[in-house]
Amino acid sequence: MKYGIALFPSKKLQDLVNSYRKRYDTHYALVPPHVTLKTAFEAEDDEIKVIAKELRKVAETSEPIKISIKKVSSFAPVNNVIYLKVDPTDELQALHENLHTGSLSSQPEYAFVPHITLGQNLSDDEHSDVLGSIKMLDIHHEEVIDRFHLLYQLENGSWTVHETFLLGKESE
């Protein structure tokens, strides 16, 4: 089965992001707005029990994460993804690194750029137009996220929460 690990922002921020995603993101219906901490990986049922135990340890030794968003950016020309840039704090970077060690050990395909996707799979012209208009928004958002989620992919391609891990607290 395919799994991934993500942070979900507040409903207020999700609502703002979804107001763009429903028009510009082909994955809008598959997963809520999120910050990807570990991209999709394959695991069997017995492996996921070991991984979940390790995730509990990572959560207990990590503090809640303060995220700050001040601008819209893009991964162009590599790909036409438009996103809210999440400031890469030491705490966020450390959590990302901890989720790529031990039984979770893997080499990420891309450098860690914390972000929340607004649009993807756009044509070059659409990407340019949408990015130009969204960049004019005055976005200043800060919040503290106190949990991360182990997600799994359903047969229809959508993602759902398998388990939630509270940061800085023991979770049973």
Image (cartoon, rainbow, N blue to C red):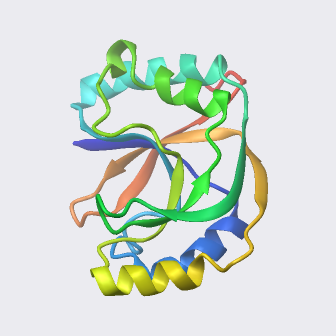
Q: How many marks?
A: 0
Q: Tell me, yes or no, if residue 100 can be seen here.
A: yes
Q: Residue 112: x percent and y percent? A: 45, 38
Q: Residue 72: x percent and y percent? A: 58, 66
Q: Height in image: 145 above or below 118?
A: above
Q: Height in image: 70 above or below 151?
A: below
Between 29 and 26, the one lying in front of the other is 26
Q: Residue 53: x percent and y percent? A: 46, 19
Which residue is at a point 65% across and 46% down the rendered structure image?
87
Question: Residue 91's image quarter?
Answer: top right
Q: Is residue 88 left or right of residue 96?
A: right
Between 24 and 3, the one lying in front of the other is 24
Q: Is residue 39 left or right of residue 73?
A: left
Which residue is at a point 41% across and 74% down the rendered structure image?
28
Between 154 and 83, the one lying in front of the other is 83
Which residue is at a point 56% across and 30% down the rendered structure image?
93
Question: Residue 62's image quarter?
Answer: top right
Q: Is the C terminus in the top left, top right, bottom left or bottom right quadrant?
A: top right
Q: Is residue 83 left or right of residue 70?
A: left
Between 22 and 107, the one lying in front of the other is 107
Q: Height in image: 115 above or below 1?
A: below
Q: Is the N terminus in the top left, top right, bottom left or bottom right quadrant?
A: top left
Q: Residue 104: x percent and y percent? A: 35, 22
Q: Tell me, yes or no, if residue 23 can be seen here.
A: no
